[in-house]
Image (cartoon, rainbow, N blue to C red):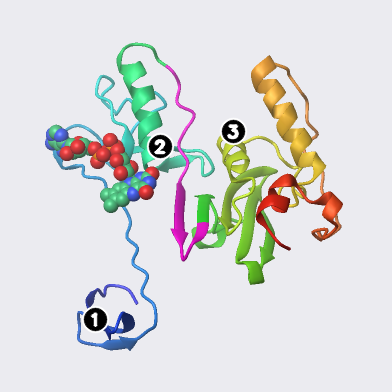
Amino acid sequence: MTDRSVAEITGGNGEVRGLVLDNGERLECGIVIIATGVVPNVDPVKDTVIKVNRGIPVNQFFQTNISNIFAAGDVAETFDIPRASGMVNANWPNAHEQGRYAGLCMAGKMVQYPGSLGMNSVSLYHIPIVSLGIFDPESEGIRGVDVKIRANLEQNIYQKLVFKDNRLKGAIFIGDLGYCGAVKDLIKEQSLVGIIKDSILEEKYQLYAFLRKKRQEKMEGKDIEWPETYSSTQRYQKSFNEESWTERERDRRIW
Ligand SMILES: Cc1cc2nc3c(=O)[nH]c(=O)nc-3n(C[C@H](O)[C@H](O)[C@H](O)COP(=O)(O)OP(=O)(O)OC[C@H]3O[C@@H](n4cnc5c(N)ncnc54)[C@H](O)[C@@H]3O)c2cc1C
């Protein structure tokens, strides 16, 4: 239902029973989830020469269309890394990072911002949930993606990775945040990850080896060549053999 808003939530004794819409229509329901987007406040620059789209578009140095006027944070439309297009990614980590870059650029040290990443982290009914980048490509009309899923519904675990052109574009982690941090870095760097496509959710040796090499690249400046793709046709089956559990699983989870 679009173009409708909620006039009233009905219920009693701590329980939701339904909704009354603004046209008087009643709907029964047992749960209400309220979500809203972010609309940047561009009023201060309205009717000025500063260009506005959804937010204020900026280049990699946070310059607006007027080169000595800068914008960063929630109000800025920056380069979205997985989508490779302009986007308002309004959250605190992006705003914080962008403020630092914009400050440096404004002070004359023109450091190039690699781009922003949409991400959300929330806990619902004690279940941690993280989403990163493009996690629902269909809804965005993005084709040619490769999706890997690991799910264990009894344990409220669901993990989804979205790849395109052997690069990670987005992810969802529910119940087990596992390699969420590493996945975020791989999306931000747009590394070629074809070779570990099948090992990320499985947390197999290849993933560890890949991350170790990436660290070497970063820390020791080593230039390591990666084959562009490697894909196994075997479906992943998590092993229930105690010997093969990772430390993390052994500590926290009973399979
Ligand atoms: C309810 C809520 C919950 C959130 N939860 C999370 C969360 O869990 N995790 C997360 O990462 N992010 C969260 N965010 C988003 C996060 O707060 C923002 O992304 C972040 O604060 C953006 O920083 P900013 O400096 O770009 O903008 P703001 O923090 O909005 O700062 C802009 C400042 O500009 C000032 N200002 C506006 N107009 C003018 C003017 N004309 N002249 C002078 N000053 C002006 C405003 O008063 C404000 O102080 C949440 C936001 C809201 C509203």
Provide residue 46's location: percent of width, then percent of height: 16, 40
Instruction: Verify whether residue 124 appears in magenta.
Output: yes
Q: Amino acid at mark 2?
A: Asn
160 vs 113, left or right, is right
Residue with the mark numbered 2: 94
Q: Residue furthest top?
A: 108
Instruction: Quadrant for residue 230, please give it.
Output: top right
Whether the residue under disc 3 has CB within 8 Å of ligand 1:
no
Q: Nearer the viewer, residue 211 or 83?
A: 211
Residue with the mark numbered 1: 21
Q: Nearer the viewer, residue 76 or 159?
A: 159
**Residues at marks 3 and 1, CA–CA distance in whole angstroms:** 45 Å
Residue 56 seen in render: no
Chain-order first, disc 1 or disc 2:
1
**Residues at marks 1 and 2, CA–CA distance in whole angstroms:** 35 Å
Of the numbered discs in the image, which one, if any, rests on residue 113?
none
Instruction: Say which element carries label 1.
Output: strand
Work out whether 159 lies above or below 7. above
The residue positioned 77% from the left and 47% from the top of the image is 199
Image quarter where the N terminus lies is: bottom left
**Residues at marks 2 and 3, CA–CA distance in whole angstroms:** 15 Å
Image quarter where the C terminus lies is: bottom right
Whether the residue under disc 2 has CB within 8 Å of ligand 1:
yes
Whether the residue under disc 1 has CB within 8 Å of ligand 1:
no
Chain-order first, disc 2 or disc 3:
2
